[in-house]
Image (tube, rainbow, N blue to C red):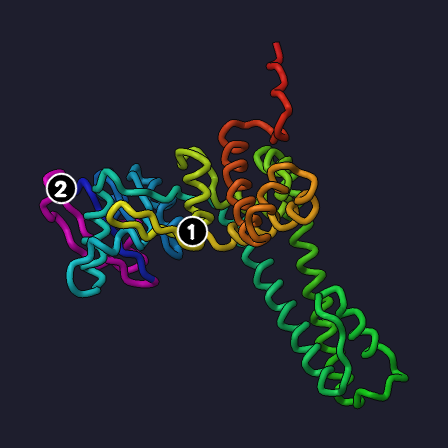
């Protein structure tokens, strides 16, 4: 019998397969080693293969799709309700197979190798940024033991490094000075690497048409533009900009019942990295245009600053969706669209 739907539970070495026919009857349940995965799907009649969107899922989706199969990725939280009783690989594969057949299921687009490569640059940049903060905090803490402090902010670290570079400053013992100088060297090397990644993202943003259009939106620069383009890919998978904002977690969390609407803080769902980038961009726009732009000024008069920033981040997400789906540059409010070329 031929399987119409396959549920594949991914793992590092051992994978579980659960297949059913068009009537829902189980036709195969099998454990596969990593080296047998592609051989199994190469000999299988083309069908719908469901997987959870997790580590390695996009790679396997591209590889399996080469054999003519239709691969659909699903968020793990949407698959969990279909798990029966105990948590096992076999039960997970059965739940995935059941979930992929639901007509109302939401699927995750499969990312290309180029998209994943861009996201790796962002993740490495994020790791280096965290290491930079860690080194700065360590440097501040150790120098504070000798009574040497500097104002907060990464821009004020130069005052601390200047103390270490001054051989006539006797407040720091020679042994401590030598060790702390190693931290300073590590900090400068980390800053150099972050600068190189920023330059690479800037070049990529200039070469990509979608990124160039996104950068016309106030609050979106090369880093945010490349992150949006690589993470979202095809923005038409979202029905509207509001759906994109909700996917990013920039909408209130709802706990409504009995006809009563109860709204809380933002849901913080979706990609936290993108949400943080949009909030940071909105904060910059708010500081520079908060008193001059009518909409922002009115918002600040009614709401606290941080609430207004999140509202602006929500608007940035909706604007980014419009730019990506319509293929047009951002137009400031009040400006008319240019006539189409003959």
Q: Is residue 49 magenta?
A: no
Q: Are marks 2 and 1 in contact (CB under 8 Å)?
A: no
* Residue receiving disc 1: 270
Query: Which is more toward the observer, 37 or 296?
Result: 296
Q: Which residue is at the front of the view, 193 or 131?
A: 131
In the rendered view, does 2 fall on the left or right side of 61?
left
* 34 up-or-down from 132: above or below: above
Mark nearer the N terminus (2 vs 1)? 2
Question: Which stretch is magenta?
Answer: 12-39
Question: Alpha-carbon distance for marks 2 and 1?
Answer: 33 Å
Of residues 203 and 300, the one nearer the viewer is 300
Residue 140 visible in the displayed image: yes
Question: Residue at the location (44% across, 55% down)?
Answer: 265
Q: Quadrant of residue 215 in the image? A: top right
Residue beneath disc 2? 21
Q: Is residue 207 visible in this depiction of the protein? A: no
**Residue 318 appears at what percent x and percent y?**
50, 38
The quarter holding residue 87 reads bottom left
Disc 1 residue crowd, few under 14, some 14–19, many 20+, Cα 10 Å: some
- In the picture, measured across the screen, residue 277 lies left or right of residue 137, that is left
For the C terminus, give its image quadrant. top right
Q: Secondary structure at mark 2?
A: loop
Q: Quadrant of residue 329?
A: top right
Q: Number of numbered discs present?
A: 2
Tell me the residue at 60%/14% (across/down).
340
Between 213 and 112, the one nearer to me in the picture: 213
Asked if the stretch drawn in magenta spans residue 34, the answer is: yes
Above/below status of 31 relative to 315: below
89 sits to left or right of 232? left
């Amino acid at each position: 019998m031929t399987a119409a739907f396959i549920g594949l539970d991914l793992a590092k070495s051992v994978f579980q397969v659960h297949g059913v026919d068009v009537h829902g009857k189980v036709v195969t349940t099998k454990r596969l080693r990593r080296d047998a995965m592609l051989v199994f799907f190469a000999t299988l009649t083309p069908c719908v293969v469901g997987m959870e969107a997790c580590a390695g899922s996009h790679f396997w989706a591209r590889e399996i799709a080469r054999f003519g199969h239709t691969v659909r990725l699903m968020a793990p939280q949407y698959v969990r309700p279909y798990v029966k009783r105990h948590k096992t690989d076999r039960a997970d594969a059965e739940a995935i197979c059941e979930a992929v057949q639901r007509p109302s299921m939401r699927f995750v687009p499969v990312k290309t190798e180029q998209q994943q490569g861009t996201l790796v640059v962002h993740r490495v940049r994020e790791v280096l940024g965290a290491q930079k903060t860690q080194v700065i905090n360590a440097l501040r803490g150790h120098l504070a033991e000798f009574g040497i402090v500097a104002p907060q902010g990464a821009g004020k670290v130069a005052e601390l490094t200047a103390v270490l570079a001054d051989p006539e400053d006797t407040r720091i013992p020679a042994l401590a000075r030598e060790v702390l100088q190693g931290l300073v060297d590590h900090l400068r090397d980390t800053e150099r690497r972050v600068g190189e990644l920023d330059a690479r993202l800037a070049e990529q943003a200039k070469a990509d048409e979608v990124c160039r259009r996104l950068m016309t939106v106030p609050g979106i620069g090369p880093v945010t533009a490349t992150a949006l383009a690589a993470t979202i890919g095809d923005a038409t998978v979202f029905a509207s900009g509001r759906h994109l904002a909700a996917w990013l977690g920039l909408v209130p969390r709802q706990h409504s019942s009995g006809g009563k609407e109860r709204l809380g803080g933002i849901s913080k769902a979706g990609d936290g990295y993108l949400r943080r980038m949009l909030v940071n961009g909105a904060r910059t726009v708010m500081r520079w245009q908060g008193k001059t732009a009518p909409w922002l000024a009115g918002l600040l008069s009614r709401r606290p600053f941080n609430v207004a920033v999140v509202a602006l981040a929500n608007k940035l997400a909706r604007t980014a969706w419009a730019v990506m789906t319509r293929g047009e540059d951002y137009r400031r409010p009040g400006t008319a669209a240019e006539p189409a070329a003959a």
